[in-house]
Image (cartoon, rainbow, N blue to C red):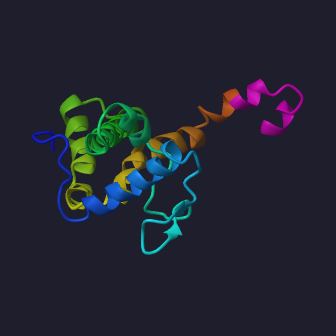
Amino acid sequence: MFARPTALGGSDWDQHLFYYAEALKNVVEYGQLPLWSPWYCGGNVLWQNPRVALLSPVYPLAIVVPLALAMKVNIVLHYWIGFVGMHLLLARVIGLTFGPGILYLASVFTLGGASALHLAVGHSVFLPAFYLPLLMFFVFRVFQGRALRPSCRSQSSESASCR
């Protein structure tokens, strides 16, 4: 992936990098919100397109490095988020303490075939799947009462409603 950092990649990478590039072009060159894309299929929606990640670390990174490299760093960042989320889920929610076991189970999810295969052919829309373990960690924390109690204590007049 980083042997040729600015290479585009094969399959659908050109199409998905185009979505990121047209959002950048709208904001940087034209000073507009990325609502519409006049460059794709004779004009198409951009804001409502589910294949366009408008809130992504790619955009700040693309200011410093080329877009293809920014996308590759974005992928590494999402893999790291997947590993951290699985570690938190396994260690703090499930209670695993065996380090190699945690690493193995985190690798099964994060390095599993589905995500790797989709990203290999350019399906960047599957990157949010790496947030799932972190989201599940926070959901379990809420149900365990660890995250709900501090929010109840911070309310002054409505603290009786949280009991």
Residue at the outermost right position: 157
Identity of the residue drawn at 36% across and 33% down: 91
Q: Count the marks.
A: 0
Q: Residue 141 placed where, x, y %? A: 54, 38
Q: Residue at x 56, y 64 (%)?
A: 48
Does 123 sit above or below residue 163? below
The residue lying furthest to the front in this view is 30
Q: Viewer-proximal residue, 80 or 26?
A: 26
Q: Position of residue 143 (x, y in %)?
A: 58, 43
Position of the N terminus, as image quadrant, is: top left
Q: How would you classify the magenta stretch by its main secondary structure?
A: helix
Residue 160 belongs to magenta span:
yes
Q: Position of residue 28 (x, y in %)?
A: 49, 42
Per the rendered image, the range of residues in magenta is 151-163
Q: In the rendered view of the protein, which quadrant contains the C terminus?
A: top right
Viewer can see residue 36 = yes
Q: Please tell me in which quadrant of the rendered image residue 86 appears.
A: top left
x, y percentage for residue 107? Answer: 22, 43
Residue most extreme to the bottom = 42
Left or right of residue 117: residue 26: right
Q: Residue at x 51, y 62 (%)?
A: 46
Instruction: Decide whether residue 136 is among the magenta residues.
Output: no
In this image, 100 relative to 26: left or right? left
